[in-house]
Amino acid sequence: MTTGQHIETRQEETQKKNTISVLDGVRAFACLIVIWFHIYRIPRDLDIWSTSPTTHPWLNSLLYFGQYGVTLFFVLSGFLLFLPFAKALLQRQNWPSIRRFYVRRVFRILPAYYLSLILIILLFQQQYLQPQHWKQLGLFFVFLMDSSQTTYKQLNAPFWTLAIEWQFYMFLPLLTFGMRMVVWRVRPSYRVCATMLCILLVIAWGIFTRYVGTYFQSQHPAATILVPRSVLNVFLFFTYGISGKYYEDFGVGMLLSLCFVYAQLPESSLKLRHLLQKCSPWLCGAGVCCLLVMVLWNYNQRYVDTWSFFSHPLLLNHYYLVNQLCISFSFGLCLLALLFGSSWLKVPFNWPILHKVGMISYSLYMWHLPFLLVFLQGTQSWLSNWQPLQAYWILWLWILLLVIPFCALFYRWVEVPGIKFGERFSRRKAIPVTEPSLQKVEATEIKEQVKSGVR
């Protein structure tokens, strides 16, 4: 069986089992817009092409906004991983196995990540083999490369987001256990409100730590409060890092998950589901409009006065505090429309090619930038003679012809064996052999949830 046939077979199996398979297309979209940002930004940093910020400002704003594909990844992670916990919180059913949760995350993430890390060092970043870089390299192995200026967006820039995701994965079971202590103490009719309040506190924590981190790291790097600065630095290292831990993004995904679960409950009114379906075009429209506003606002932060409205001091000075919340909320509205909307809304994300890209998105996310840099370094003088738009499409051709096939092979030979190995350890040993149907359902559930997990 060829690699393409293998991916197609896996994708068809996932579509049959996964009731929200449209999110595979959304995952592919998130990965592709990150790539379009890097194809746009890296040649500028290398001076391969240079255009005025006011030249084609709408197009430049849209391309520059591609960096927020990582925000969409965070929202998807919050939604998918909180889903079984949301069901347990609202229905007071058996609590999801923490052991199974961690085993799945470990075997889904670590094999592909560690192999990619080692290969990228050996092939492209050999300076990390020298003793003076071992301290920084250690942060990459323990997923704390987002917390130090010496490792943030270094070695392979997309890796910093994997650190954010991994820390959220490790903390989520503890967070939901604390939520359970609150939610299960209230009346069943109040559980939705109690869960929502807990999630809003998660979002508030994300905004609070972003404010505190920016204040003490960027604005007042020598200041402190209540404790010595050395102690404060340790606190900031684990709670903020360099750019925040993005709990507001994960929180929006968790809110979306809560809404999805509540709408599926038997006691929920059919009117709610019908209302969400009827309003889905408006939700999608509102989300897209909010994203367009953020596209312009984001570009104006980088190139001030491109859009005079967003150069107002109030908007210019407080963008850092609310931009992630606004962008994740906008993506959340669009996802809500996709989850409950009519089939015509899902058509673009149910495109078979997008589903295939979605399945290899983890490998594609890790590997596209190293391959892109190699190509740019080898063809820099040649590409400089082309018009920016022509060179842009040449880079996309490189992604399509070499990077995507490589990532498809990496998915088949590294990710899939890791997933299968994790499935063996995550099966419940306590299932009686006299109930084969129950065992079959359990195995199917494991495969469905592992395959639908973000990265």
Image: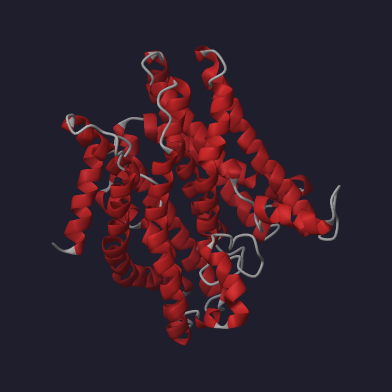
Whether residue 386 is visible, yes or no, is: no
Observer-nearest of 156 and 379: 156
Which residue appears at 70% of the width and 51% of the height?
A: 308
Which residue appears at 56% of the width and 83% of the height?
A: 130
Where is residue 175, by image quadrant? top right
Observer-nearest of 89 and 159: 89
Observer-nearest of 43 and 354: 354
Which residue appears at 50% of the width and 47% of the height?
A: 169
Which quadrant is the N terminus positioned in?
Answer: bottom left
Q: Looking at the picture, does residue 290 appear above or below residue 53?
A: above
Residue 186 rendering spot, x and y as whole percentages: 57, 16
Give the tally of numbered discs.
0
Left or right of 57? Residue 222 is right
Residue 431 rendering spot, x and y as whole percentages: 26, 33
Left or right of 3? Residue 237 is right
Q: Looking at the picture, does residue 326 appear above or below residue 198?
A: below
Left or right of 273? Residue 78 is right
Whether residue 216 is visible, yes or no, is: yes
Where is residue 434, by image quadrant? top left
Farthest residue to the left: give it: 1
